[in-house]
Image (tube, rainbow, N blue to C red):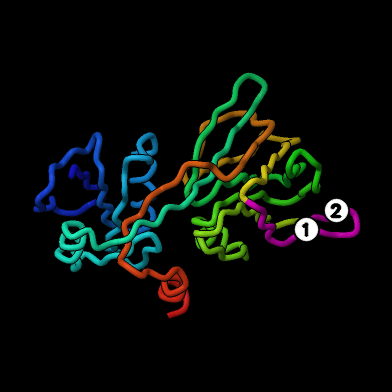
């Protein structure tokens, strides 16, 4: 089996062939940020790659192993005594007057203006849902529900559920302007379109990385058919991980 190593850690001494260009297995050493960077590094090969998250920091939601478990990991891989969690990611398309680009996010796509109040028309399945006024909007797949989305008061969703979530960032609500002001969880077939009326100070990021796309007029999002595969211990429970990460 061919493997790659991602993150700041000493070179592995394992019975595999190292191939950083076309691996079958990617060992990510660090936290969730390192794992996200590893996934984006091999985004064009997701169908062939499995990711092993090894936590070397304080908190890692995507890291199922600690660094002192390396011998256990190698044993599990050799015996095939592990499970694969496949989770759907987010697909987005940014459109302006001249072009469009399509990309993917594991945690979220954020549309924010730190300077001016945004007016964004929200369409769900081609029907107008609301006009949002506030700092911005966040669209996330279930894998991102415990990330930025959670800090905004969004719902925590079991990533085995196929869904998409829209979360408002600092909405303005008064007798003149009203929006839902609560997280909205939609089915896997739902499509969210955001029409931006003022884009001068708009900042768009995917998984915390700023996107270099000017004068955006429309943002289209949906749950992608593409998945990311994680190697986990047998009988790994999502809510045990939630408890470990956020409660105890």
Instruction: Name the main secondary structure of what is drawn in magenta.
Output: loop
- When the figure is inspected, residue 139 is found, relative to residue 42, above or below; the finding is below
Secondary structure under badge 1?
loop
**Residue 199 in picture, x, y percent from top left:** 68, 34
For image coordinates 80% across by 55% down, the residue present is 179
Q: Residue furthest right?
A: 175
Q: Quadrant of the N terminus?
A: top left
Few, some or many residues within 10 Å of mark 1 (<14, 14–19, 20+): some
**Residue 5 in picture, x, y percent from top left:** 22, 47
Q: Nearer the viewer, mark 1 or mark 2?
A: 1
**Residue 40 in picture, x, y percent from top left:** 39, 41
Mark 2, residue position: 177
| Range covered by the magenta-colored residues | 173-187
For image coordinates 25% across by 52% down, the residue present is 27
Give the side of residue 147 with respect to residue 163, left or right.
Answer: left
The numbered disc on residue 169 is none
Residue 177 lies in the magenta-colored region: yes
Can you see residue 41?
A: no
Residue 179 lies in the magenta-colored region: yes
- When the figure is inspected, residue 58 is found, relative to residue 88, above or below; the finding is below
Give the side of residue 127 with respect to residue 241, left or right.
Answer: right
């Amino acid at each position: 089996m061919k493997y790659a190593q991602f993150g700041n850690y000493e070179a592995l001494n394992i019975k595999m062939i190292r191939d950083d260009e076309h691996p079958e297995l990617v060992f990510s050493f660090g936290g969730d940020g390192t794992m996200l960077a590893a996934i984006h590094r091999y985004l064009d090969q997701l169908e062939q790659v499995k990711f092993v998250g090894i936590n070397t920091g304080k908190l890692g939601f995507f890291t199922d192993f600690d660094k002192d478990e390396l011998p256990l990991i190698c044993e599990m891989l050799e015996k095939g005594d592990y499970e694969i969690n496949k989770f759907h990611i987010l697909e987005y398309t940014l459109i302006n007057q001249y072009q469009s680009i399509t990309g993917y996010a594991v945690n979220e796509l954020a549309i924010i203006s730190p300077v001016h109040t945004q007016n964004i028309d929200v369409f769900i399945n081609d029907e107008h849902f609301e006009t949002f006024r506030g700092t911005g909007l966040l669209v996330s797949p279930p894998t991102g529900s415990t990330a930025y989305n959670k800090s905004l008061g969004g719902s925590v969703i079991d990533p085995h559920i196929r869904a998409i979530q829209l979360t408002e960032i600092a909405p303005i609500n008064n007798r003149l302007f009203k929006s839902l002001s609560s997280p909205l969880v939609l089915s896997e077939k739902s499509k969210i379109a955001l029409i931006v009326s003022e884009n001068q100070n708009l900042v768009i990021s995917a998984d915390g990385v700023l996107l270099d796309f000017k004068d955006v007029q429309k943002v289209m999002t949906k749950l992608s058919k593409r998945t990311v595969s994680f190697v986990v211990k047998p009988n790994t429970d999502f809510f045990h991980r939630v408890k470990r990460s956020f409660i105890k």
